[in-house]
Every structure is written in structure tokens, then in C-alpha cells.
Image: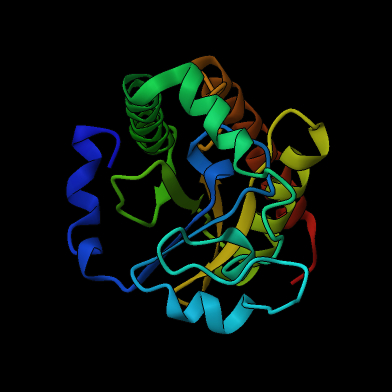
Amino acid sequence: MLADEGQALLCGIEKADSVTIDPHKWLCVPMGAGMFLSRDWRPLETAFAVSTDYMPSASRKQRDPYIHSLQWSRRFIGLKLFIALANLGIDGYAEMIRRQLGLGRYLHSALLARGWQVLNESPLPLVCFAPDTTTPDRQDTVVRRIVDHVVATGVAWLSTVDLRGRLVIRACITSYETTQADVDLLLELLDEARTRASILAVGEPS
């Protein structure tokens, strides 16, 4: 919603009763600042409301935080997001998100150019892919070895996921610090890991 080119992806969100957002994903704040946005206060009151003699009575007009949140507002978790928003502003967030969307497109194209199979189509910077192997029976083993090799370097992190019954590699760009040079380095590591994993698979008995 912050970047013009991304708004169409959320078409229909206005019909939801509630929305959850993890600001640590794209809003460049540390983990532990999850957001729950609800159209109706009543579910929150049902879950969290308390009544004690030493607290003022619940106000439906002022929305006392202690009746609709777990922490009673004592921990200002939202400060993380507030500071980032105050520093970057809406325009800064929009530019950051546009850059990440662009890096996702770059990663998608570069993987295809290097002979990888890209197995999802998404405008988001989330790419699921796998090596184009001639040994389907060893596909899962090769995928796991590739991921293990890349993660073990400590340079980049990715994971595996079951996509329509097939184990694939999942790479997602979420850090505001990620650059094209970082993506290029990941691509080099993936190519190296693919070669190593394929050699090992060929040398194993059937």
C-alpha cells in the first residue's frame, strides 16, 4: 500500500475483518513488533479485557490500551515502527519497497539465465526455484545439499519449501540493506553449490 506499484496486489484487503502485519518483513524494524489491525474492537476485548479496582473503568471512547492488548501498553513495542516511519517517511518506505520489488525481478531473471528452473510467478520478491537436474529421483537430495551449502557459508540464507508436491529452494528479499551485489553473490554461491551437489549425486549408487 505504501508503493504505488504494489497497491494492486492488495486489492480486496478492504473487505477483511482483520489484518496481521509483520513489520520486520518489509518495514525494516527488529522482530517482535507484530501488528493486528481489526475492524471491530470486540474480539480484542473478549481476548484481553480485564477488570481491576486499581485501574480506571474501560472507556469505549478513549480505547484504553489495557483492555484490548496483551501487554497493557507497558512495553512500547510500537516505538520500533514509529522511529522507522519518522526517519524514512512514506516516500522513503515507498522507495525501499520499489527497490526490493526490483531486486526480486532481477533475481528471477538471473536464475533463468543461469539455467535454474523458476517454479513460481509472483510480483513480490519471493522466488521458488530448483536445479534443472536429469536425476528426478535425487532431486530432493540435491536441493537440500544446495541449501545446506549456501547457509553454511554464513553469507546468505534461504530455505526449502514443498511447492505442489516438489521440494524447491525459496529465496525472499526482505532486508532494506539488500543490494544487487548481494543478489549476485547469492547467485554465485548457488551455482557453486549446484555443481557440488550434482557431482555428489552422480557419484552415489542408485
Q: Residue 76's spot in the image, x, y percent?
A: 68, 43
Question: Quadrant of residue 109 in the image?
Answer: top left
Frontmost residue, 8 versus 116: 8
Q: Residue at x 68, y 45 (%)?
A: 31
Q: Is residue 155 above or below residue 121?
A: above
Frontmost residue, 104 versus 31: 31
Q: Is residue 199 above or below residue 63?
A: above
Q: Residue at x 64, y 45 (%)?
A: 158
Question: Quadrant of residue 185 in the image?
Answer: top right
Q: Residue at x 77, y 48 (%)?
A: 148
Q: Residue furthest bottom?
A: 46
Q: Is residue 120 left or right of residue 129?
A: left
Q: How is the image coloured?
A: rainbow
Q: Residue 17's spot in the image, x, y percent?
A: 32, 74
Q: Residue 204's spot in the image, x, y percent?
A: 79, 61
Q: Is residue 2 above or below residue 170?
A: above
Q: Is residue 183 left or right of residue 33?
A: left
Q: Residue at x 68, y 78 (%)?
A: 50
Q: Count numbered badges in the picture.
A: 0
Frontmost residue, 143 versus 55: 55
Image quarter hosting the C terminus: bottom right
Frontmost residue, 50 versus 166: 50
Q: Is residue 63 left or right of residue 31?
A: left
Q: Is residue 69 above or below residue 9?
A: below
Image quarter hosting the N terminus: top left
Q: Is residue 63 left or right of residue 29?
A: left
